[in-house]
Amino acid sequence: MKRRSWLGLGALALLGYVGLPFLLVQRLGWGLVREGRQEKKALALTFDDGPDRATTPAVLDALRDVGARATFFVIARRAEAHPDLIARMLAEGHEVEPHAARHVHAWLRTPWGAFLDPVRAARRVSAVTGRRVRLHRPPHGGYTLATLLGQRAAGMTGAHWSVEGRDWHPASTPESVRARVNKLAHPGAVVVLHDAGPGARNTVPALPGLLADLWGRRYDLVPLGELDGAAPLTARDLPRRLLWELDRVVDRSGGIQPVGGRADNLFRIGATHFALEGVTLADGTPVPKGTPAAELHLNSPLLVDLGLRRSFRLAQGDFRDLARDLQTRPELADARVIFGVSTFAALLARLGFETQNLQSADARRLRAWSGVLRRAYRTEGPPRDPQLSVVTREAFVARFGER
């Protein structure tokens, strides 16, 4: 019994020291800066593990050539070894913040070592820059309770990311890193790449093309400290974050993809079969249950942040991407109708969809879910009942397809 008690206490201590920081902080981002608001088309590029004389200058050159500014999370000893590179970063408008004194995952440190590393990194990096440091990204983005306490003792806020380039992965290539960041980039995103270490072998050759892509999509590239709305996530933000995680799970299980292959599109789409009964279009065309269909899902965080008026302007271009998807994605080839069920039927009606009320059972269930979404996204204004928005494939492609 005594042994079981000790095991139970050990498990409880491990949960408090590693488990809760992993779930609440590292995974959900509670207390961390990990993204900004989505009203403005801006994102933050961040670079870890430098500086390195062999690779960092090429990263700085690429950023300078397009007038982009970024945030560098540096290792203390490398900053001390290359003060000229740190001086160049600052002179060219970049942020320099501490990454680590020693690049070791927090889970592999003693509690005392995990506590001291942010404190030491802050002091040493600040001595090189001559400036007060404010943000800290621990190695691998890993957290324990001691890491959090160390950040607090050093007067720093943890900084995570919302888009990972995976430039460090052995299977990655410059082309795959560029494609991945392009796919996942969205307003308010915090992108993590590497200007030193294994990731630099992909980031250095990928960066000029990636920067050209992002500029071509009219993104402003700013340091993390200047990203609009980039603030530590609070308990009020967690419902929205949890719903974002839920969307990812639903998308993976249902084969749902962002329209146009871009996370900054207002819509996601998936192949399915029409699940409602008794639906007939205005011209008398029936839509039987089981009809091959493309189900439209909203990018709720982006739509809420933009508002209906700006979303309407963006939606017209995004629907041109959807028309291309209908013509090129094999899983959508048989879809006869495009439909969605949401409280934003008025927006879709302005874009050619027919709007129909739902049967009472469906309406009650979706009205309850709509209430959850309103509270999570803190949506203002009177609540709206969910409605069906539907259009035939032919009508949609005729309106938004390339001519």
Image: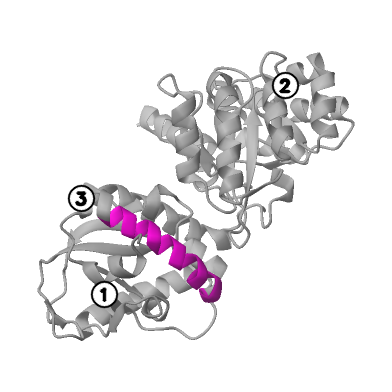
Query: Residue 197's image quarter?
Result: top right
The residue at the point 29 percent across, 65 percent down is: 397
User: Circle 2 — which element?
Assistant: helix
User: Is residue 252 shown above or below 75?
Assistant: below
Tell me which amino acid carries mark 2. Pro
Quarter of the image for the C terminus: give it.
bottom left
User: Circle 3 — which element?
Assistant: helix
User: Is residue 72 shown above or below 289?
Assistant: above
The residue at the point 74 percent across, 50 percent down is: 226
Tell me which amino acid carries mark 1. Val
User: Is residue 338 shown above or below 61?
Assistant: below
Residue 57's disc is: 2
313 in magenta: yes
The answer to whether residue 104 is visible is yes
Q: CA distance from mark 1 to mark 3?
A: 19 Å
Sequence-wise, the earlier of marks 1 and 3 is 3
